[in-house]
Image: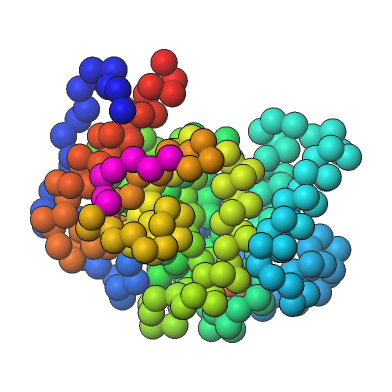
């Protein structure tokens, strides 16, 4: 990745400076809140996303969802930022009343994601943690506060990026989402990526890396290396929660984020 030579600020998330970890789920993000099990489920799924109620294969559902979004855009003549925002809002409404996997039954709020719908950089974590589940917003717990510092250290703000997770509902006791849950939720993430159309996706942690780059990938091996797929550059790095547990991971994440910043600057050049 070529550099424009700009000197980046030193990282500010020094050891011991970050907030203490919360209950421990590695990832955690958010959006505005909508309680799980919303009574509008039937209405919204029936009107906007009837296919979500059907037991069809995940890939088919993703294609249907994408087709619906494209059709709506063409029909209504929407384009650009407002179209993206509307599409994401419609997808979020469906997500907020989703019951495609068992995680819906135990979460407090669905955490869809938030940020700039036209963002050139997306950050994808694992799933909501305790604080995210409480607030319905991604990365607002201790790991989220550290993510804010990581962004700030390379001159980025949440307004410039889009932040979400592989699964949108908190797994009980912060356990890892299982493959069925990941598969059930993947149409949401895939559609978010298609609508936002980022140039760079930063995979925060092992699950996001395996979900988006390579199902057999080991984060410790491929961290810090660019991967290109379908015109998108993927940068796998450690999850902020891993840094809270092991401060020695801060330096490699800092190095990874410098690469991300340089790539971002080159996009703007
Ligand atoms: S985790 Fe995803 S698929 Fe499962 S209920 Fe929540 S939004 Fe639906």
Relative depth, front residue between 17 and 28: 28
Q: Position of residue 218 (x, y in %)?
A: 29, 61
On whether residue 20 falls in the magenta region, the answer is no
Foreground pick, 214 / 224 = 214
Question: How many marks are shown on the rendered structure?
Answer: 0
Residue 123 on image: x %, y %:
42, 48
Q: Name the colour scheme.
A: rainbow
Figure check: 72 above or below 61: above
Q: Is residue 146 left or right of residue 76?
A: left
- 142 with respect to 11 (left or right): right
Whether residue 208 can be seen here: no
Q: Is residue 128 above or below residue 266?
A: below
Q: Is residue 186 above or below residue 114?
A: below
Q: Position of residue 87 (x, y in %)?
A: 71, 47
Over which residues does the magenta segment extend?
222-228
Q: In percent of the image, x 36 and y 29: which residue is there?
A: 263
**Which residue is found at the position 11% from the left and 55% from the top?**
248
- Give the x, y percent position of residue 190: 59, 54
Quadrant position of the C terminus in the picture? top left
Residue located at (38% from left, 43% from top)? 227
> From the image, which quarter does the N terminus lie in?
top left
Please name whichever residue, 112 or 192, is drawn nearer the observer in this view of the structure. Answer: 192
Examine the structure image and report whether residue 223 is included in the region drawn in magenta: yes
Q: Does residue 213 show up?
A: yes
- Ligand 1 sits in quadrant: bottom right
The quarter holding residue 183 reads bottom right
- Direction right: furthest residue: 75
């Amino acid at each position: 990745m070529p550099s424009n030579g700009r000197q980046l600020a030193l990282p500010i998330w020094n050891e011991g400076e970050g907030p203490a970890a919360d209950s421990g789920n590695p990832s955690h993000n958010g959006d505005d809140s909508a309680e799980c099990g919303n009574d509008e489920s039937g209405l919204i799924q029936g009107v906007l996303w009837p296919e979500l109620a059907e037991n069809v294969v995940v890939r088919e559902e993703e294609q249907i969802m994408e087709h619906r979004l494209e059709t709506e855009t063409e029909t209504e003549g929407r384009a650009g930022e407002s179209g993206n925002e509307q599409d994401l809002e419609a997808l979020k409404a469906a997500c907020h009343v989703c019951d495609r996997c068992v995680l819906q039954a135990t979460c407090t709020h669905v955490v869809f994601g938030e940020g700039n719908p036209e963002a050139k950089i997306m950050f994808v974590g694992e799933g909501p943690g305790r604080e995210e589940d409480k607030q319905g917003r991604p990365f607002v717990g201790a790991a989220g506060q550290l993510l804010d510092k990581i962004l700030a250290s390379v001159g980025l703000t949440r307004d410039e990026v889009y932040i979400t997770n592989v699964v949108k509902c908190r797994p009980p006791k912060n356990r890892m989402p299982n493959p069925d849950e990941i598969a059930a939720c993947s149409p949401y993430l895939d559609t978010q990526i298609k609508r936002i159309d980022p140039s760079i996706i930063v995979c925060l942690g092992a699950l996001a890396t395996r979900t988006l780059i390579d199902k057999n990938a080991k984060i410790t091996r491929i961290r810090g290396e660019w991967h290109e797929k379908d015109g998108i550059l993927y940068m796998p790095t450690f999850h902020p929660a891993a840094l809270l547990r092991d401060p020695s991971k801060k330096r490699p994440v800092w190095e990874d984020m410098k690469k991300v910043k340089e790539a971002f600057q080159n996009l703007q050049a």
